[in-house]
Image (cartoon, rainbow, N blue to C red):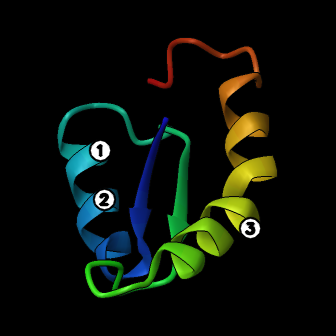
């Protein structure tokens, strides 16, 4: 399971497929993040939290 910003959706799909992990769980956040304030980053994390927990606890430990 990984987290990345929306800018990397296509790259993430290509990379996980190339590595044999096309079913890898992923959560995408708004982009860009490098110039966000602390408050904005906390809001991004809060918005993604439930989805991240859901993916991490889904039970399938081998996403191939």
Q: Secondary structure at mark 2?
A: helix
Q: Which is nearer the eye, 33 or 59?
A: 33
Earlier-in-chain disc, 1 versus 3:
1
The answer to whether the residue labelled 2 contacts the one labelled 1, judged by CB atoms less than 8 Å apart, is yes
Classed neighbour count for the residue bearing mark 3: other residues with Cα under 10 Å, few (<14), some (14–19), many (≥20): few
Say left or right for 50 vs 32: right
Q: CA distance from mark 1 to mark 3?
A: 24 Å
Q: CA distance from mark 3 to mark 2?
A: 20 Å
Seen from this angle, which residue lies furthest front?
38
Residue that mark 2 sits on: 12
Name the residue carrying label 1: 16
Which SS class for mark 1?
helix
Position of 12 compared to 57: left or right?
left
- Asked if residue 59 is positioned above or below residue 49 in the image, the reply reads above
Query: Picture coordinates of residue 28 (x, y %)?
Result: 52, 66
Height in image: 13 above or below 57? below
Number of callouts: 3
Q: Are marks 1 and 3 in contact (CB under 8 Å)?
A: no
Q: Please, what secondary structure does the residue beneath circle 3 have?
A: helix
Image-based side of 28 in relation to 18, left or right: right
Q: Quadrant of residue 9?
A: bottom left
Q: Is residue 11 above or below residue 20?
A: below
Above or below residue 58? Residue 4 is below
Q: CA distance from mark 2 to mark 1?
A: 6 Å
- Mark 3 or mark 2: name the one nearer the start of the chain: 2
> For the point 55% across and 41% down, which residue is it?
25
Name the residue: 61% across, 66% down: 42
Disc 3 designates what residue?
Answer: 47
Observer-side mark, 1 or 3, equals 3
């Amino acid at each position: 399971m990984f987290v990345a910003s929306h800018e990397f959706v296509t790259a993430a799909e290509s990379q996980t497929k190339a590595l044999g992990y096309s079913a890898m769980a992923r959560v995408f956040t708004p982009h860009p993040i490098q110039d966000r304030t602390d408050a904005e980053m906390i809001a991004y994390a809060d918005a993604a939290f439930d989805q991240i927990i859901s993916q991490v606890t889904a039970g399938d430990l081998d996403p191939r």
